[in-house]
Every structure is written in C-alpha cells, then in structure tokens.
Image (cartoon, rainbow, N blue to C red):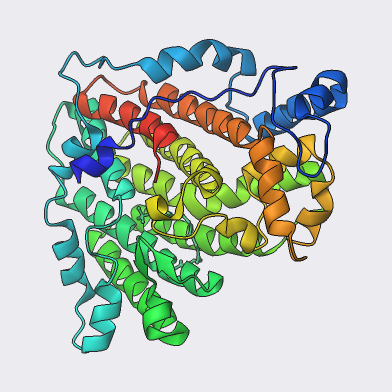
Amino acid sequence: MAMRWSCWRRGCSWRPTAVGSPRPERPGCAEPLGTRAASDTRAQIPYFSLMKILMSASPNMHSISQFHQRTPAMCCCRQTQSGEKYSDPFKLGWRDLKGLYEDIRKELHISTRELKDMSEYYFDGKGKAFRPIIVVLMARACNIHHNNVREMQASQRSIALVAEMIHTATLVHDDVIDDASSRRGKHTVNKIWGEKKAVLAGDLILSAASVALARIGNTAVVSMLAQVIEDLVRGEFLQLGSKENENERFAHYLEKTFKKTASLIANSCKAVSVLGCPDPVVHEIAYQYGKNVGIAFQLIDDVLDFTSCSDQMGKPTSADLKLGIATGPVLFACQQFPEMNAMIMRRFSLPGDVDRARQYVLQSDGVQQTTYLAQQYCHKAVREIRKLRPSTERDALIQLSESVLTRDK
Ligand code: GRG
C-alpha cells in the first residue's frame, strides 16, 4: 500500500504555456500551433475570460496572479509546520484503517453466495482508499484542533467505512451505465455477473452503508451523507447532458465535478468534524478542504484519462471521449481549436471523432490548463486546512492535497 502511495509523489508543476512558446503541429494542418497562438490574440483571450468564469464559479478563489506566485512554493514544500517529522499521509492514515476491508465485509452481512461475492468484489485492497485516508486524517486534525486529543472516535472511523462503501457502490453502478469492462486491472462486476445483478450489488452496498451510517445515531451526519447520494445521482445525470454555450459548458462541468466526486469527500470531512468538534467554523474548514481537494482529484482524473496508459490506470483510457463526455482538457482545447465545438455537440459520435479530439487535446494546452486549475483548487484546500491548529495530521492533509496533483493513477 505504502509503495503504491509513494508513486503519487512525482514532482510536477504545470502552468499554462506562455504566449508564443513553441507547440506541436495541429492535427491535419501544416500551420504550427505556436504560430497561430502567437499571432492570433483570440487564441489567448478566451483563456483569461475562461479563468474569470471559473473563478466566479468558485467565489472564494484568489486571483490568478497570486497562484502564479504561490505555486512553486507550495509544490516544493516538504517541511511540516507542526514541527514533527515528515509523515507519509497514507502511512499515517492507514494506522487507523487496519482491518478496513474486513470491517466493511462484516457490514455487508450477506448469506447468498453469489450476492456476497459480487458485493465484496471491490473490497479487496486494490483501490487507493483515498477517501478513508482523508477522513481519518481530518478526524484527528479536528480532534487535536478542538481539545488537543489525538484519538479518533469509533463513530469517526465508521464514516471512513461508509465513505468507501458509498464510493464503491457508485463505481459498480457507474460501470453499468458506461458498460465498462475493466476497473482496477480486473473485470467489472457487470462484465462478470451481468448488468441486472451488478445494479443490485451496488444497491446492496449502498443500503449496508446506510445502515452503518444510521447506527452512528447523529441525524446531522445522516443528512450530510444523504445529500452526497443525491449529489452523486444528480452529477451522473448532468454528465448525460451537454451545453451549447461555452460558458455554460464550464459551469456545467464544474457542477458535475463537484457532485460526482467532491461532494462525498467534502461531506465526509464535514461529518467527522461534526462528530469531533462543536465549532461550525471548523465544520466549514473541513467541508471546504474536502470540496477543493475533491474537485482537484476529479480534474486530475480527467487529465489522466488523456495522459496515462491503460495498464497504469487499470481501465481503458480516453474513456470519457468514447462515452461522448467533454471534460476539462477538451473544454480548454476547444478554446484553442473552436472546430472542436461541433464534435463536442455531437458527443464525438462520428467515426474518427474520438481520435481527432484526442489529438487536438494533446496538441493544445488543455492538459496543462486543467492541471493548473486543479492546482488552484489544491491551493484553496491548503489555505483552508492551515486554519486548524498545527498537527502531524493537518500537515499530512496538506501533503495529501499536493499528492493529488502528482498522482499517476
Ligand atoms: C448513489 C450508488 C449511487 C450511484 C449514483 C453512478 C453514479 C450515480 C455516480 C457515479 C459517480 C462516480 C463513479 C464518480 C467517479 C469518481 C472517481 C474519480 C472515481 C475514481 O476514484 P478512485 O481513483 O478509485 O479513488 P479507486 O479505484 O482508487 O477507489
């Protein structure tokens, strides 16, 4: 596990390419991209107006110039403010998560062999356990902030289990919706047992998560996680639609990103803060940290769909394009290559669309700009978590947000 986590720590700090810097050639076009971008200011202006839109979508974001100044400092940071020895967030978090998958399997309580095999299929330790790690680190950071008690409550650990169970249920359902064949380097549940049974297995995991959540006995926490389930469904639903207007398209993309991915992380972080500390200011810090890291996590996921290989990801890449989905790298690339608009609108459905769109993305700044946007969300997350009293766990959360940017799977 620790080995896998360490592969996230690849030094990397993307920035949008400077005006006039050399670029590769456009697909099917002799004119090099650099010529076009340098001579045609229209190729640059949309980026800045786009950033304005993105900033207004996240009103708490600082100005772009501030990020330019702060980026190198944050990404090179290896010192902890708590004064304690540098700690690997995964190792630190995992101390509270020993037996996580055994405990989840106990929550499933299934007597029927086939349903048991299907429901337990992904609780095999092959996922990154990103959500449980964040949750236990946040729980301890809040407890220390509140009364200098490092110990985690049993109810807080239960949130880590519930978060991983909800996440897993969504993976099972998502693979049915996408008709996916592989995940985490193995066949999907739908591929092995068929769609109908896969839907039921996802439902079963979700219901077991709900029972475990109810057992905690805190209605505020129950409604936070219920909101997550609503957001997940609405996020997935948003993904089924597309917007014609470019500005609306970005707002739509960020809303979907929050609902599909960040809401679970934000609300799980908030839930453990509520269980550990009565101060609403701390609850908001926990929520904002989770929300911003969650959005960054999904933005990088969208980048990896273009830059990583299938072996690394354990699932096919360019999957979003094949499903007709335009993510950050495509939307940014479209600023440079407006001819991509038509492809986005027809959801890359004509023969050759997927390959051409992929080429446009790789030869544009789409990947860098999406990564840069993810950096900005991580900066915001770090600013939030720094408001808590210094602790090893708080520093690990800072480290974790940086790892989101450099992960390669
Ligand atoms: C409420 C059960 C339920 C379903 C709601 C299908 C659906 C509707 C929502 C899909 C949400 C979804 C799958 C979002 C993707 C989030 C994401 C980035 C997944 C990958 O997470 P990793 O990289 O995966 O942490 P591992 O394999 O490491 O656990």
Can residue 148 be seen?
yes
Direction front: furthest residue? 30
User: What residue is at 38 percent from the left and 36 percent from the top?
Assistant: 286
Instruction: In the rendered view, tell whether residue 104 sits above or below residue 272.
Output: below
Q: Residue 395 location in percent, x, y?
A: 27, 24
In which quarter of the view is residue 187 placed? bottom left
So how many labels did they put on this image?
0
Can residue 284 be seen?
no
Q: Residue 301 location in percent, x, y?
A: 49, 46
Q: Residue 374 location in percent, x, y?
A: 53, 33
Horizontal relation, residue 297 to residue 164: left or right: right
User: What residue is at 29 percent from the left and 44 percent from the top?
Assistant: 135
In which quarter of the view is residue 30 placed? top right
User: What residue is at 49 percent from the left and 60 percent from the top?
Assistant: 316
Q: Nearer the viewer, residue 61 or 21?
A: 21
In which quarter of the view is residue 398 placed? top left
Q: Quadrant of ligand 1?
A: bottom left
Instruction: In the rendered view, tell whether residue 102 sits above or below residue 131.
Output: below
Horizontal relation, residue 31 to residue 239: left or right: right
Q: Nearer the viewer, residue 175 or 107?
A: 175
Horizontal relation, residue 285 to residue 22: left or right: left
User: What residue is at 30 percent from the left and 41 percent from the top?
Assistant: 134
Instruction: In the rendered view, tell whether residue 37 sits above or below residue 232.
Output: above
Direction bottom: furthest residue? 112
Q: Nearer the viewer, residue 293 or 340?
A: 340
Q: Residue 370 location in percent, x, y?
A: 59, 35
